Image: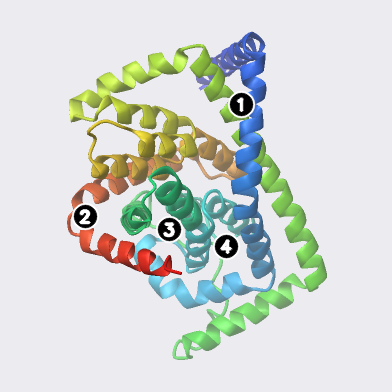
């Protein structure tokens, strides 16, 4: 164990020193990449994430998390092996994108509402792209085809649900850390009444005024989005200096040799390489892949990249979970499984979903009429 820790420390030290050398060797590229990363954070991530983070914290203070926990417990436990409050985390994660699901999971762990196994499962399948990025940036911006949005959404979010079902069987069968709010009520009491009562109890236990809740929510949301912005800028700089130093081309050659075995075109391996580090760059490269590559193949690779999330997102998740006992290994497994499943779903459902794509295209055309 000690040898592993020393080896990891030496490896991290070497990578840091190597990165510093690259930054000193290409200062102009580093500055331009940092400016690009700041632009991505300010124009896309900040407005997309900040409101959801504030709302989620206020809802948690008002006991709405406990309301959903009681209401959804009969559904979430048998299907996903997590308490009913996982339904709230799942909904917020799907709606607001990474890393909100992991953030809420860490908060539930801090409150003692979930244990380690439940938290690892929840963080694994609630980490997804948000619909605004999937539809606006990927379908419309990168592919120039908004009719792809239904296929991408079904593959991406459907894959996340399948990951949750699969992770139900990872680890021992969990037991709740604390009894669910309202568990001492009569079993025959209407579930909605129990959920409302649980919300009321949680609100009384919290005790903060709305003004205090809003102030804390804004402060914590700003902290999180600043951390996310720093990681986006860092990975943007690392990718650009590695590209300038031709390291990315070597990595592209290696990955291309591997993916040739499954007949992935070289143009799409560039998207995979970029997506390995940063999801935006990978999805953009998938949409821009030229040649005679079928649209279905490009969409499948975009789904793979979206589900993987990029090392930038992984770093965000690790930073959010570092003060908990939740391990990175199950999260990594979930991301790999999600990537494979969403890519496979695009391939399998491409032809059956063409009528839906056509209907979406007709609807969008009608909406664009003056």
Q: Which residue is mark 3?
A: 174
Sequence order check, earlier mark of 1 and 2 = 1
Q: CA–CA distance between discs 3 and 2?
A: 34 Å
Q: Position of residue 110 (x, y in %)?
A: 64, 55
Q: Position of residue 194 (x, y in %)?
A: 54, 84
In this view, the mark in front (2 or 4): 2
Q: Earlier in the sequence, mark 2 or mark 4?
A: 4
Q: Is residue 200 left or right of residue 207?
A: left
Q: Badge 2 is on which residue?
A: 349
| Labelled disc at residue 113 | 4
Tell me the quarter of the picture where residue 323 sits.
top right
What residue appears at the point 34 percent right and 65 percent down from the top-left corner?
79
- Residue 305 place in picture, x, y as percent: 39, 40
Q: Nearer the viewer, residue 289 or 226?
A: 289
Can residue 228 be seen here? no
Q: Residues within 10 Å of mark 2 (few under 14, many from 20)?
A: some
């Amino acid at each position: 164990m000690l040898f592993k820790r020393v080896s990891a420390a030496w490896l991290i030290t070497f990578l840091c020193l190597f990165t510093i050398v690259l930054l000193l060797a290409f200062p102009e590229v580093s500055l331009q990449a940092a400016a690009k990363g700041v632009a991505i954070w300010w124009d896309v991530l900040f407005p997309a994430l900040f409101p959801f983070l504030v709302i989620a914290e206020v809802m948690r203070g008002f006991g709405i998390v406990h309301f959903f926990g009681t209401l959804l417990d009969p559904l979430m436990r048998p299907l996903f092996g997590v308490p009913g409050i996982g339904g709230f985390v799942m909904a917020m994660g799907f709606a607001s994108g990474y890393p909100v699901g992991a953030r809420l999971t860490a908060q539930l762990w801090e409150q003692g509402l979930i244990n380690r196994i439940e938290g690892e499962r929840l963080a694994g399948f609630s980490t997804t792209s948000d619909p605004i990025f999937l539809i606006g940036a990927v379908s419309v911006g990168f592919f120039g085809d908004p009719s792809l949005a239904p296929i991408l959404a079904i593959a991406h979010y459907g894959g996340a649900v399948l990951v949750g079902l699969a992770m139900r069987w990872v680890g021992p069968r969990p037991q709740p850390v604390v009894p669910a709010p309202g568990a001492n009520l009569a079993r025959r009491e209407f579930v909605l009444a129990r959920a409302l009562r649980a919300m009321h109890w949680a609100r009384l236990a919290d005790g903060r005024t709305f003004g205090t809740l809003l102030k804390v929510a804004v402060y914590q949301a700003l902290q999180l989005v600043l951390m996310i912005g720093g990681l986006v800028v860092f990975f943007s700089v690392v990718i650009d200096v590695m590209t300038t130093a031709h390291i990315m081309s070597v990595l592209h050659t290696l990955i291309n040799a591997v993916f040739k075995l499954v007949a992935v075109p070289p143009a799409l391996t560039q998207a995979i390489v970029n997506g390995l580090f940063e999801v935006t760059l990978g999805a953009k490269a998938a949409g821009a892949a030229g040649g005679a590559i079928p649209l279905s193949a490009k969409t499948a690779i975009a789904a793979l990249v979206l589900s993987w999330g990029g090392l930038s997102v992984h770093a965000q998740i690790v930073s959010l979970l570092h003060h908990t006992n939740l391990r990175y290994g199950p999260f990594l497994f979930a991301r790999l499984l999600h990537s494979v499943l969403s890519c496979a779903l695009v391939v399998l459902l491409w032809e059956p979903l063409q009528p839906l794509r056509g209907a979406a295209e007709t609807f969008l055309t009608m909406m664009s009429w003056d």
